[in-house]
Amino acid sequence: MKKEKEAEGKGGATSRLFREICFSVNTFLLSPFIDESQAKNTFNLTLAIIGITYQQVYTLLLLVQIIDHISFLRSLVSVLYRNRQKLLWTFLLLALLIYMFAFIAFYAYPQFDQECMTLYHCYFLLIN
């Protein structure tokens, strides 16, 4: 016990400083990669700082976390994710049908020349 006190007296300040540095590194640098909740908080803080200093668009990403906290929205996202291929084919069919109506409007109704100068304009006019 006496030897421990002597060792602490000689190198106690150095070892204490070393322990404090290790604690700080572990807490502030390594814990975001180890602890999931700390990683989320660090990510949120980073987005908030970037949103305040750089562009405010990054603060909108913080609103996405609302989905994680509301169970109905979480289940809605999971249903959409599971049926993503069917939804993709449905939107592709919708785009094809709109293109067909734009094609008919462009060639069959020439009185819409001001709105439908090209087939591209007719397509996006029908989307609106």
Image (spheres, rainbow, N blue to C red):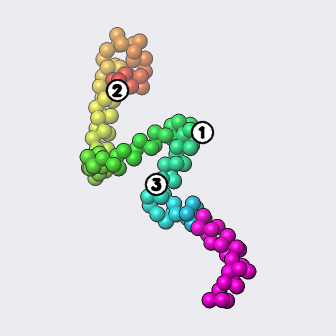
Task: Please rate how many residues cluster around mark 3, counting C-alpha atoms within 10 Å: few if below 14, some from 14 to 19, many from 20.
Answer: some
Mark 2 and mark 3: Cα distance apart in space: 39 Å
- Label 2: few (<14), some (14–19) or many (≥20) C-alpha neighbours in 10 Å: few
Q: Which of pointers 2 and 3 lies earlier in the amino acid sequence?
A: 3
| Tag 1 residue | 53
Magenta stretch in the rendered image? 1-25
Residue 40, numbered label = 3
In this view, 44 is above or below 37: above
Amino acid found under the numbered disc labelled 1:
Thr
Main secondary structure found in the magenta portion:
helix
Most foreground residue, 105 or 6: 6
Q: Which mark is residue 7?
A: none
- Residue 97, how many percent across, how many down? 28, 32
- For mark 2, give the secondary structure: helix
Label 1 sits on a secondary structure element that is helix
* Residue 119 in which image quadrant: top left
Q: Residue 56, how many percent across, how many down?
A: 53, 36
Q: Which of marks 1 and 3 precedes in the sequence?
A: 3
The residue beneath circle 2 is 127
Residue 42 vertical position relative to residue 127 in the rendered view, above or below:
below
Amino acid tagged 2: Ile
Mark 3: which secondary structure?
helix
Say which quarter of the image contains residue 6.
bottom right
> Gap between marks 3 and 1, in whole Å?
20 Å
Q: Residue at x 71, y 74 (%)?
A: 14
Residue drawn 67% across the image and 70% down it: 17
